[in-house]
Amino acid sequence: MPYASVLQFELALGAKETAALADPEATGTPVPGRIDYGLTLASGDINIILGDRAPAIAAAQPDFLQAACIHIARWHLSGANTIENDPITAKHDYYTRLLRDMADGVVGNSGGESGGGSPHYGDVQIVSPVNANPFSRANRR
């Protein structure tokens, strides 16, 4: 089961881009199931990267996995290009590097800088899903 739905994909990227990705030949008729297929490919990529930690991370970080799934699917559906400075490829690389970091809990193990650098937020901070909440009542006393 994909980590994101077609509706979530459309809400994140917009109806216009979703329609363009569903109709790559610009015929005016979307290819049935194309977006679902991209989300399934992306979910498979996420499962391969995370391995046996996928269920625990999915339970702890569902919003992150949803965003990762959407952007990795977008990369697959756009042709998986490797054009220099392509924002779609940059987001794909960003999410896959963070997933690799989450897979074993070691920051920067993806062969680049920590988290691969963010294409839109600056420095990246990884929060472990297994750590206690630092803002819980017990910790605020």
Image (spheres, helix red, strand yellow):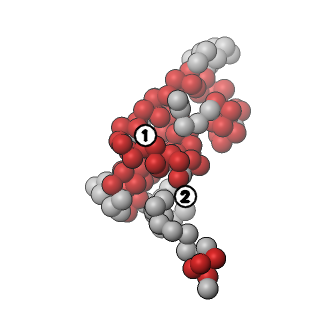
Front residue of 26/54: it is 54
Q: Is residue 35 above or below residue 141?
A: above
Front residue of 132/77: it is 132
Q: Is residue 94 above or below residue 125?
A: above
Where residue 37 sits: x, y (%)? Answer: 52, 23
Helix, strand or loop under label 1: helix
Determine the residue positioned at 54% across, 37% down: 3
Q: Is residue 22 left or right of residue 37?
A: right
Helix, strand or loop under label 2: loop
| The C terminus: image quadrant | bottom right
Front residue of 31/20: it is 31
Amino acid at pointer 2: His
Determine the residue positioned at 53% across, 48% down: 59
Determine the residue positioned at 59% across, 78% down: 138
From the image, tell me which residue sits under label 1. Answer: 46
Which of the 4 quarters of the picture holds residue 109? bottom left
Where residue 32 sits: x, y (%)? Answer: 61, 15
Amino acid at pointer 1: Ile
Q: Is residue 135 left or right of residue 43?
A: right
Q: Is residue 11 left or right of residue 41?
A: right
Q: Can residue 93 be seen here? A: no
Separation of marks 1 and 2 at Cα, in angstroms = 21 Å
Q: Which mark is residue 3?
A: none
Where residue 36 sits: x, y (%)? Answer: 57, 25
> How many other residues sit within 10 Å of disc 1, few (<14), some (14-19) or many (≥20)?
many
Q: Which mark is residue 120?
A: 2
Where residue 87 sits: x, y (%)? Answer: 51, 46
